[in-house]
């Protein structure tokens, strides 16, 4: 009897430790902009440790208190969010993402990058998008986000593709996958999630996709929205895998798993 109790306690301890490690660990992000800044003017603010190399440059966008949130996506958000009306451009340089260059991705090489962002618009039939630009800031190489046609946008090398459905003014989680190739067409894939959706493993069929044979280098990010409408953006995440840019399991969910596991272990040893 004593040996059985010891085995039960040991199994419970191992389960608790393994699940708590999952609960407290962060995905291996290359960059994470959580807008954890002072409320007010966003211009010049930057987090060089977790965000990007250079500060924001904008005259119209501000930091608001409180993060964007989605019930089904318990992101470990930090600080505030970016908010403002469309019509102006903001840009900043990407930090070194471990690619041996100060750029997000070089379309002349073989590579895969994932990027996610939380977006919110104030009305249907308006747009809010992120544009990945070249170093001269003259060309949007890739654009993704929420289109004014209430679909998710996947623009590449000047050509638009749309898919999925954007639900009104719900907060949306939008994920971009870039597959660059040294030879042949480069590809992008965009997946959008509304608040009522369920997120899972990387999809085999995405909301929208696009392809083009490119050789440019992405060096800048621009956030843009419909003129006269308020848009909000939060939690820009960049990583090399799908798991890097999707939400972590919620603590409550993990506690339920722990509880279920403990009950199972106890019953297993009592049989």
Image (spheres, rainbow, N blue to C red):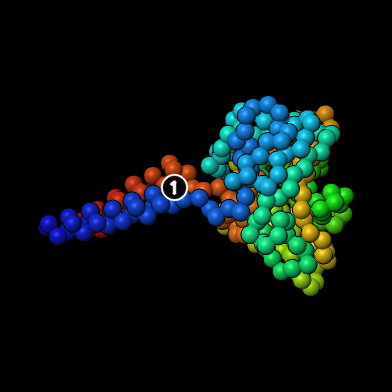
- Looking at the image, which residue sits at the far top? 40
Image point (55%, 43%), residue name: 75
> Residue 188 occupies which quadrant of the picture?
bottom right
- Looking at the image, which residue sits at the far left? 1
Give how far across and how far down residue 178 sits, in percent. Answer: 71, 59
Image point (47%, 44%), residue name: 250
Decide: is 165 above or below 232. Answer: below
Numbered circles on residues, count: 1
Which residue, given by chain and number where applicable, does mark 1 sit on? 24
Give how far across and how far down residue 154 sits, in percent. Answer: 78, 53
Pick the quarter of the image with the N terminus: bottom left
| Front in this rendered view, residue 249 or 125 | 249
Give how far across and how far down residue 44 sits, in percent. Answer: 71, 35
Q: Is residue 75 visible?
A: yes
Image point (30%, 51%), residue name: 262
The secondary element bearing badge 1 is classed as helix
Judge from the rendering whether residue 69 lies leftward or rightward of residue 102; answer left or right.
left
């Amino acid at each position: 009897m004593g040996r059985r109790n010891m085995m039960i306690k040991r199994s419970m301890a191992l389960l608790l430790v393994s699940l708590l490690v999952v609960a407290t660990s962060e995905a291996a992000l290359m960059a994470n902009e959580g807008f954890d800044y002072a409320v007010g003017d966003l211009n010049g603010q930057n987090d060089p440790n977790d965000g990007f190399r250079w500060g924001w440059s904008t005259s119209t966008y501000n930091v608001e208190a409180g993060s964007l949130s989605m019930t089904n996506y318990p992101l470990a958000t930090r600080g505030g969010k970016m908010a403002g009306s469309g019509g102006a451009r903001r840009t900043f340089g990407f930090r070194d993402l471990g690619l041996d260059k100060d750029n997000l991705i070089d379309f002349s090489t073989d590579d895969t990058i994932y990027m996610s962002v939380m977006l919110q618009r104030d009305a249907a039939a308006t747009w809010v998008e992120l544009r990945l630009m070249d170093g001269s800031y003259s060309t949007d190489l890739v654009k993704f986000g929420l289109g004014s046609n209430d679909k998710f946008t996947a623009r590449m090398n000047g050509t638009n593709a749309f898919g999925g459905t954007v639900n009104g003014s719900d907060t949306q989680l939008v994920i971009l996958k870039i597959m660059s190739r040294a030879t042949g067409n480069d590809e992008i894939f965009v997946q959008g999630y509304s608040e009522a959706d369920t997120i899972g493993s990387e999809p085999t069929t995405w909301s929208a996709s696009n392809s083009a044979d490119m050789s440019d280098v992405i060096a800048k990010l621009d956030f843009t929205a419909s003129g006269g409408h308020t848009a909000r953006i939060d939690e820009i995440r960049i990583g090399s895998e799908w798991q890097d840019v999707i939400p972590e399991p919620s603590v409550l969910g993990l506690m339920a798993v722990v509880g279920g596991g403990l009950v199972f272990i106890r019953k297993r040893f009592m049989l």
